[in-house]
Image (tube, helix red, strand yellow):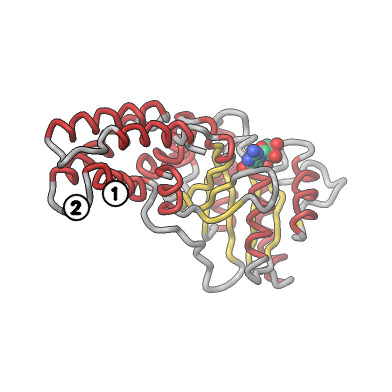
């Protein structure tokens, strides 16, 4: 995760070692190097610009302790800005006052929605919640079965249309699932919706219809971090087409660059709430901007 950026930044910082104090020239040269490192990590250009201008501004200011040497000063500034660009505070789940809390997942096919649904269910159950998984992806023939497998692994019941009742209506399934949850004391409903390989208006409309039918407490946009800048473009399309409260980044384990993670918050204005870092159900947690920044600067 983030290996490229980590390596590049380490070499930027090491070039400052041994300097007495930061001159204007040092600041500019360092900023240029950091800019290149961010571009190489596939960070979106507006984010790079903002990042660099803030680093320069802080490096010129006097807020940094005189006790730190120039390399330490720059590391401290870059760390602060990384935390900021990654979202600052950890975004917690907002539970509804009257259960069930409805969480809807949206995103492209292959983004990792179904896997994430299972991970989220397991994670919530470990904290004494009683989740219900809902198969509202009725587009792909085996999507329901896949969710059932995931549900079994997570130890979470799955609400799905009765077999033999035809394809079924995802909006209807979603609506009924909330009723079912209420009657059966599930305090959280996790709705897995259909995705396509590319952004498509029919898919968006279906997600928007489900949203309107169940008024989710949280809509999570699930996106594969490995697709880099495309993640940012898709995130924008879903923001316009469906809207969402937060982002769940998947496949961070395979993302050597980190461009999506570093860009998405700034571009969409939505926090990253979850990080998925592997195929196992345990490879999942809240996204902690401060820990992620430390990891990059490790
Ligand atoms: P969906 O089409 O959005 O429901 O995506 P799936 O949940 O079916 O996931 C697509 C593929 O990505 C599957 O092979 C998953 O095992 C894999 N996958 C999901 N999340 C992760 C992750 O965080 N890391 C890795 N390496 N693979 C993942």
**Rendering coords of residue 8 (x, y %):** 38, 31
Rendered position, 106 above or below 196: below
Q: Find residue 137 and report its image quarter.
A: top right
Q: In this view, does 186 lie to the left or right of 38?
A: right
- Report which residue position mark 1 lands on: 76
Estimate the spatial distance between the alpha carbons at disc 1 and disc 2, rounded to whole Å. Answer: 8 Å
Q: In this view, does 10 lie to the left or right of 63?
A: right
Q: How dense is the environment of label 1, judged by Cα within 10 Å: few (below 14), some, or many (20 and up)?
A: some
| Residue 194 appears anywhere in the view | no
Identified at 56% across, 37% down, the residue is 224
Query: How many numbered discs, if any?
Result: 2
Name the foreground residue: 12 vs 263: 12
Identified at 20% across, 55% down, the residue is 67
**Rendering coords of residue 194 (x, y %):** 65, 40
Rendered position, 69 above or below 40: below
Ligand 1: which quarter?
top right
Identified at 53% across, 35% down, the residue is 255
- In the displayed image of the protein, which residue is found farthest to the front? 18
**Rendering coords of residue 9 (x, y %):** 36, 35
**Rendering coords of residue 177 (x, y %):** 70, 59
Label 1: element kind: helix
Name the foreground residue: 82 vs 98: 82
Rendered position, 125 above or below 120: below
| Viewport quadrant of the C terminus | top left
Which badge, 1 or 2, comes first in the chain's sequence? Answer: 2
Identified at 43% across, 42% down, the residue is 296
Q: How dense is the environment of label 2, judged by Cα within 10 Å: few (below 14), some, or many (20 and up)?
A: some
Disc on res. 64: 2
- In the displayed image of the protein, which residue is found farthest to the right? 164
Assess whether mark 2 and mark 1 are in contact (beta carbons under 8 angstroms). yes
């Amino acid at each position: 995760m983030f290996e490229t950026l980590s390596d590049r930044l380490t070499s930027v910082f090491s070039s400052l070692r041994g300097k007495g104090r930061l001159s204007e020239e040092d600041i500019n040269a360092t900023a240029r190097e950091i800019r290149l490192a961010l571009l190489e990590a596939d960070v979106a250009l507006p984010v790079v610009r903002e990042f660099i201008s803030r680093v320069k501004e802080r490096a010129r200011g006097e807020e940094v302790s005189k006790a730190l040497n120039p390399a330490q000063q720059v590391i401290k500034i870059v760390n602060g800005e990384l935390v900021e660009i990654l979202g600052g505070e950890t975004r917690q789940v907002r539970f509804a006052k009257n259960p069930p809390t409805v969480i809807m997942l949206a995103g492209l096919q292959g983004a990792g929605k179904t896997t994430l649904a299972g991970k989220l269910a397991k994670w919530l159950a470990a904290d004494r919640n009683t989740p219900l998984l809902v198969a509202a992806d009725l587009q792909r023939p085996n999507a329901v079965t896949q969710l059932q497998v995931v549900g079994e692994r997570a130890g979470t019941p799955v609400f799905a249309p009765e077999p033999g009742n035809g394809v079924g209506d995802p909006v209807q399934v979603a609506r009924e699932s909330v009723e079912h949850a209420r009657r059966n004391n599930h305090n959280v409903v996790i709705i897995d919706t259909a995705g396509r390989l590319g952004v498509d208006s029919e898919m968006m409309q279906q997600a928007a219809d489900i949203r309107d039918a169940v008024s989710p407490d949280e809509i999570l946009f699930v996106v594969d971090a490995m697709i880099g800048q495309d993640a940012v473009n898709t995130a924008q399309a879903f923001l316009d087409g469906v809207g969402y409260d937060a982002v769940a980044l998947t496949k961070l384990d395979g993302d050597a660059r980190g461009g999506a993670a570093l860009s998405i918050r700034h571009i969409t204005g939505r926090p990253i709430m979850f990080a998925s870092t592997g195929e196992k159900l345990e490879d999942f947690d809240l996204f902690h901007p401060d820990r992620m920044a430390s990891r990059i600067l490790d």
